[in-house]
Structure formats: structure tokens, C-alpha cells
């Protein structure tokens, strides 16, 4: 039984929806910002709450807890504070957590742990900041002083939380580092063993959360990213005359400079942590090239090159998706191409390549959670790519504009907002991958927040008139 330490608890009035594996959360921005739960399979909608009354300034935000157990709502209370409420979707109860949430310039002063087991929220009284740590599994509620609320992020294992310039043990509510954390450059390793810091000389260091010791890397630069296996830390080194890159090996305790030109940009780790993707200009800036740097050999191999420029890259299992423009960098064309590459990406001979002309600028690319399909949003419509058959299809959506879509956690539904500018039609639509069918869930102005157990939850951050 989950017990919340709250001011009061009352029963909700929204009807119980039909049993569903997942619910969609959306907000109606034309009806006093009403918050709805939607069963996409049946089309049922249930009014959860209302953010404003349409007569006053509304600052509000809403979202799911990471485990999908709660919907959280923040809106204005008295004295420039904010009210934090939790809606327990499973038990149909509403809880007022605080009516003194700190107002931080259109930022909700709260941070969920990755699993949703814990919630940190922040209050301010007489210029003194406090953080309350709620643990729903252990039914604990602890408050402590903090230096500020500028940024907050949790370690992947949920043991630690960085708040402003402090490192805090969330289990014991104790301060490990006080005023020793540069939040903008503090990144936990995926295994939660390490935290990157900056020392007094503005140099990068690594704090070992197991031993409690710091490793000074003696580099004046910025922290880029950890490898997926937590072994390597990629660093942008600014101590040289030109910007260069290096990585630190936590196993061998050694630093390795990446031997590439200063004009190159190191973009991302390979999923297997054995290499890095690097962007570079071709000679005389006649185009761009995508390289793969091998950690073990120190050698680079060509993945792809174009006479134009390379945009984003997306990885999924053994697939690499590249967005690029074949025109020269100083020539604008509205056409964006997508290249699909499959293989080990060790040598070009092992690559299987498919080409796709999306006609006009894909602006959103996302894999379905089951990995069976890739959605690509272009200005001329929504495309679906099937990696097994290397086939492409355009969804028959009658719309002038489509917003980036949301895949359901099981990959069966793709939901998105569509618009007709002339007649001001705003539809919420869903495509069913099982029967290849499209249906309109609502013809009203509903804005998607996210799926109940989805990986992507959008924060709405209304800062305007209600």
C-alpha cells in the first residue's frame, strides 16, 4: 500500500476507463486547459482535472511519473508559489503534495527518479531552499536544505541526486559534496559508479562514488558523454591551441587523445562502446564525411560521405540512420535524404545500404519500441520504414502539417497531432500497426503529453493566458 505524506487526499470524479495496456495523456488548450486520459484502443476519454479557469494568467505543467502510476500537475497557487498535485490513476485518488512549490521561471521545481520510485520537489522560504524526497516504495518523506534549484538529475540507480552544486545521497538524505559540483558538466556514468566534476582550476575530474575519491584529468574542457558500458568518458579538450577530443579509460586509468583533425566533431558512441562517430569536412569543404573511430586500434574508417552536409544520425541495434543534404553547405535546398545502413560498420564492404528520398526535411525520426518500424516525419507526410523488408510507405494522412509522433510502448500505435491551417482543423490521430488503420481520436485541440509507460514524456510548460 502506497502512503503519501500530503496535506489531504480526496476521491477523483473522472470515470474509470476500459482496461488498457497503456493510456495517453493530453491537454485541451481551448477549454481552460482540461487534462484528459485517453484509451487509444477504444477511443474513450476521461477528464482528469482542469489547469485554469480561462480568466487569469496560467502557469502550469503536467506529466506522467516514469512508472505511469501518477499524473503530476503543477499550477499557480497564492503568493507566487505553485501547487503540486499527484493523481493516482490506478486507485483514483488525488493528493495535494505542496502548495508552496518554488516558482523557478517557468520550470517545474521537481525531479522524478528514473523508475518513478522517488520524487524530489523544492520549496523556498525567506530565500532558504529546501528539498523534500518522497520514496513511494518505502513510504518515507525527508526534507533537507539545499543551495538552490537550478538543475536536478538522478543517478541511473536512483541512489544519488545532483541539485544545483550539491551531490546528495537520496537514501539517507545526506550531503556528499557541498558546493563542489558543476551541474552543467556533471554526468553520471550509466552504471552509477562515477560522476564527472570540475575542480577549483576549472579542470575535468571524475568522482568515484564507491571509493569517495576524485580523479583529476588535468584537462580544461567540457564533458561530452560516457560510453554505454561506462568504461570510457569522452572529453572535449580546450587546453590545446585548437579544440581536440580525448577519452579516459576507467579500467586502465589512462587518457587517450583521439587522433583526428581539429575541425572534426566527435558526435556519438557506437552502441557496443567500441567506437565513436565523427563528422568531418572533405578537402576544401567540398562536402562532409561520417567516420567511425575504433577505440581498440585507433584507426578510422569511412561510413558515409556526401558533397553536401550531414545532419543527425540515429542508432538502433545494427541499424544506422543518417539524415543528410546532398547540396553544398552554402547552397540551400529543401530536400533532405535518409540513408539506412546495416552491418557491423567496421569496413565499408560489410555495409548494406538503402537510399530514401523523403522529398522535404524529415524533422522527427523514432524507432518503435519493438524495433519493427521507424517513423520519419517529413513536411509532406509521415513515412514508415520496415527494416526487415527495407520498404517504405507513406501514411495516408489528410493534413497540411503533422507534429512529431509518439509510439505506444508496445509499438502497436503511433499517435500524432495533425492540422489544416485554412479551416483551422486540429485532429488527434492514431495509426494501428496491427490492422494498418488510421482513426481520429479527437477533432478538438488536444496536445499530447505522453504515454503512460512510454519513454518520451513531453513537458507542456504553459506560460501564458489561460
Image: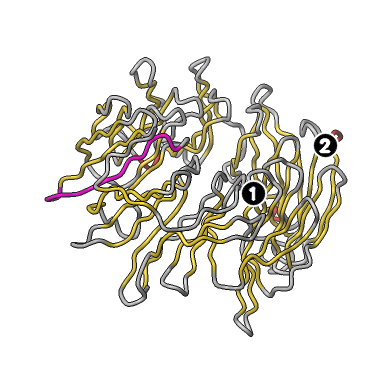
Q: How crowded is mark 1: few (under 14 residues within 10 Å), some or many (20 or more)?
A: many
Query: Residue, x 32% and y 29% (percent of image)?
Result: 170
Res 50 quadrant in image? bottom left
| Residue tagged 2 | 348
Earlier-in-chain disc, 1 versus 2: 2
Q: Residues within 10 Å of mark 2 (few under 14, many from 20)?
A: some
Label 2 residue SS: helix
Left or right, residue 243 beside residue 52:
right
User: From mark 1 to mark 2, how far is it between C-alphas?
Assistant: 35 Å
| Residue 275 x/y as whole percent | 65, 30
Query: What colouring does the structure picture have?
Result: secondary structure
User: What's the mark number on residue 254?
Assistant: none
Which image quadrant: the C terminus?
Answer: bottom left
| Residue tagged 1 | 408
| Residue 209 x/y as whole percent | 38, 21
Which image quadrant: the N terminus?
Answer: top left
Left or right, residue 415 beside residue 151:
right
Amino acid at each position: 500500500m502506497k502512503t503519501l505524506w500530503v496535506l489531504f487526499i480526496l476521491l477523483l470524479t473522472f470515470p474509470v476507463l476500459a482496461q488498457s495496456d497503456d493510456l495517453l495523456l493530453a491537454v485541451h488548450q481551448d477549454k481552460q486547459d482540461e487534462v484528459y486520459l485517453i484509451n487509444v484502443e477504444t477511443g474513450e476519454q476521461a477528464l482528469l482535472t482542469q489547469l485554469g479557469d480561462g480568466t487569469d494568467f496560467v502557469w502550469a505543467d503536467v506529466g506522467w511519473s516514469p512508472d505511469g502510476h501518477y499524473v503530476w500537475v503543477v499550477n499557480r497557487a497564492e503568493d507566487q508559489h505553485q501547487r503540486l498535485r499527484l493523481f493516482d490513476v490506478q486507485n483514483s485518488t488525488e493528493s495535494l503534495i505542496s502548495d508552496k512549490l518554488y516558482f523557478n521561471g517557468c520550470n517545474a521545481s521537481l525531479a522524478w527518479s528514473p523508475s518513478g520510485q522517488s520524487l524530489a520537489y523544492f520549496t523556498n522560504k525567506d530565500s532558504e531552499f529546501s528539498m523534500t524526497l518522497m520514496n513511494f516504495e518505502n513510504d518515507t518523506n525527508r526534507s533537507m536544505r539545499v543551495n538552490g534549484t537550478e538543475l536536478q538529475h538522478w543517478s541511473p540507480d536512483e541512489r544519488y541526486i545532483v541539485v544545483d552544486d550539491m551531490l546528495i545521497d537520496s537514501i539517507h538524505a545526506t550531503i556528499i559534496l557541498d558546493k563542489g559540483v558543476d551541474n552543467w558538466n556533471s554526468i553520471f556514468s550509466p552504471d552509477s559508479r562515477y560522476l564527472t566534476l570540475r575542480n577549483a582550476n576549472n579542470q575535468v575530474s571524475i568522482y568515484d562514488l564507491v571509493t569517495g575519491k576524485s580523479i583529476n584529468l588535468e584537462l580544461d574542457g567540457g564533458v561530452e558523454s560516457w560510453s554505454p558500458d561506462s568504461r570510457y568518458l569522452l572529453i572535449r579538450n580546450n587546453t590545446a591551441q585548437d579544440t581536440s577530443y580525448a577519452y579516459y579509460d576507467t579500467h586502465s586509468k589512462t587518457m587517450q587523445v583521439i587522433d583526428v583533425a581539429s575541425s572534426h566533431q566527435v558526435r556519438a558512441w557506437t552502441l557496443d562502446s567500441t567506437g565513436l562517430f565523427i563528422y568531418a569536412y572533405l578537402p576544401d569543404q567540398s562536402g562532409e564525411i561520417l567516420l567511425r573511430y575504433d577505440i581498440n586500434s585507433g584507426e578510422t574508417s569511412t561510413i558515409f560521405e556526401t558533397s553536401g552536409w550531414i545532419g543527425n544520425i540515429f542508432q538502433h541495434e545494427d541499424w544506422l540512420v543518417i539524415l543528410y543534404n546532398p547540396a553544398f553547405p552554402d547552397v540551400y535546398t529543401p530536400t533532405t535524404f535518409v540513408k539506412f545502413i546495416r552491418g557491423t560498420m567496421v569496413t565499408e564492404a560489410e555495409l548494406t545500404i538503402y537510399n530514401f528520398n523523403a522529398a522535404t526535411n524529415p524533422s522527427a525520426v523514432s524507432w518503435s519500441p519493438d524495433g519493427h518500424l521507424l517513423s520519419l516525419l517529413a513536411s509532406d507526410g509521415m513515412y514508415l520504414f520496415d527494416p526487415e523488408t527495407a520498404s517504405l510507405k507513406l501514411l495516408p494522412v489528410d493534413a497540411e502539417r503533422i507534429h512529431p509522433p509518439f509510439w505506444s510502448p508496445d509499438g502497436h500505435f503511433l499517435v500524432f497531432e495533425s492540422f489544416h491551417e485554412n479551416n483551422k482543423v486540429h485532429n488527434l490521430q492514431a495509426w494501428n500497426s496491427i490492422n494498418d488503420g488510421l482513426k481520429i481520436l479527437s477533432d478538438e485541440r488536444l496536445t499530447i503529453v505522453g504515454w503512460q509507460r512510454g519513454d518520451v514524456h513531453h513537458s507542456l510548460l504553459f506560460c501564458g493566458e489561460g
